[in-house]
Image (cartoon, helix red, strand yellow):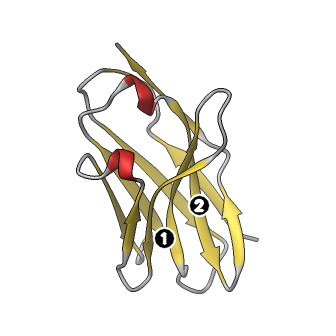
């Protein structure tokens, strides 16, 4: 059974930086895709950034140039470096992984950006 556990979320001021980490376990194969989604209060969950096993990355327009997703497949880890944070980035951030057409989610880590 695949498990994803996020860490790193906290309160930060506008303009600050955070690095989220996600540890995956329970798979004997490299994940086809790993990345991050977020859900702000009263809004739907949305894609933030995702990176395929082959290195192709996709970012939400709102985070391009500020956020960077990276993977360490040897450690089954995925990271999200977030710079120049804005109050609009406040949300619960969920780690995501896809393996053989099966989607997996972490429990979420909250990020709050104060103005």
Which quadrant holds residue 16? Answer: top left
> Left of 45 or right of it: where is 18?
left
The quadrant in which residue 55 appears is: bottom left
The percent position of residue 86, horizontal first and vertical second, equals 34, 28
The alpha-carbon separation of the residues under discs 1 and 2 comes to: 12 Å
In this figure, which residue is indicated by the disc labeled 2?
Answer: 96
Is residue 95 shown above or below 91? Answer: below
Q: In this view, does 108 lie above or below 102?
A: above
In this rendering, the label closer to the viewer, 1 or 2: 2
Depicted 41 relative to depicted 23: above or below? above
Q: Point out residue 27 in the picture as x, y percentages from the top left corner.
A: 64, 78
User: Which mark sits nearer the N-terminus, 1 or 2?
Assistant: 1
> What's the residue at 68%, 86% (across, down)?
100
Q: Which of 4 and 98 is in front in this view?
A: 98
Foreground residue among 91 and 79: 91
Screen quadrant of the C terminus: top left
* Vertical comparison of 23 with 98: above or below: above
How far across and down, in percent of the image, does residue 37 sit? 55, 51
For mark 1, what is the residue?
A: 76
């Amino acid at each position: 059974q695949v498990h994803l556990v996020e860490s790193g979320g906290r309160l930060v001021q506008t303009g600050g930086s955070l690095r989220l980490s996600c540890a995956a376990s329970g798979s004997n194969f490299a994940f086809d895709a790993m990345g991050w989604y977020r859900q702000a209060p009263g809004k739907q969950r949305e894609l933030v950034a995702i990176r395929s096993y082959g290195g192709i990355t996709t970012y939400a327009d709102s985070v391009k140039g500020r956020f960077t997703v990276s993977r360490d497949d040897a450690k089954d880890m995925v990271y999200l470096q977030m710079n120049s944070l804005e109050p609009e980035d406040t949300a619960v951030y969920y780690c995501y992984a896809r393996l053989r057409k099966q989607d997996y989610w972490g429990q979420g880590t909250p990020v709050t950006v104060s103005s």
